[in-house]
């Protein structure tokens, strides 16, 4: 007799990016600038939406804040988490 295993549950949390990954310093600096500008124009930390990171283009260094749990990146984009940006800012 065969038994059928129930399907595995889907992950409920976002996979954590590799925090040891090294980025191009110019790319990291551009992502920090985007995040710090957002923090400056929204100084009330309690009221502003907290992004999970920055999706940034490897070539142009243009980026956007990501607020969703599962970002969809273009092939030429990197994702840099807020945790990594904040750790480097302090």
Image: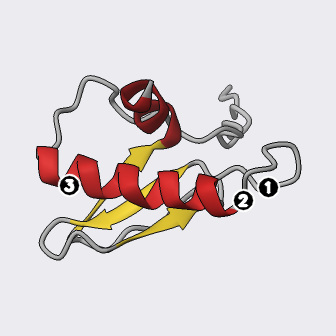
Within 10 angstroms of label 1, few (less than 14), some, or many (20 or more) residues? Answer: few
Q: CA distance from mark 3 to mark 2?
A: 23 Å
Q: Is residue 51 left or right of residue 54?
A: right
- Residue where numbered disc 3 is placed: 27
Residue nearer the viewer, 82 or 76: 82
Mark 2 near mark 1, Cβ–Cβ under 8 Å? yes
Q: Residue at x 58, y 60 (%)?
A: 38
Which residue is under mark 2? 42
Residue 33 appears anywhere in the view = yes
At x 81%, y 49%, the residue is 44
Residue in the image at 25% along x and 47% along y: 28
Above or below: residue 60 compared with residue 90: below
Residue 30 numbered tag: none
Instruction: Tell me which corner region of the image, top left, top right, bottom left or bottom right, holds residue 6.
Output: top right
Q: Label 1, on which residue?
A: 48
Seen in the picture, residue 56 relative to 49 is either above or below; the reply is below
């Amino acid at each position: 007799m065969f038994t059928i295993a129930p399907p595995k549950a889907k992950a409920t949390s976002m996979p954590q990016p590799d925090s040891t990954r090294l980025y191009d310093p110019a790319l990291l600096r551009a992502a920090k600038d985007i995040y710090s500008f957002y923090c400056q124009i929204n100084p009330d930390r309690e009221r502003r939406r907290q992004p999970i990171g920055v999706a940034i283009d490897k070539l142009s260094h243009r980026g956007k804040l990501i607020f969703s749990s599962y970002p969809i990146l273009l092939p030429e984009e990197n994702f840099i988490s807020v945790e990594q940006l904040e750790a480097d800012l302090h």
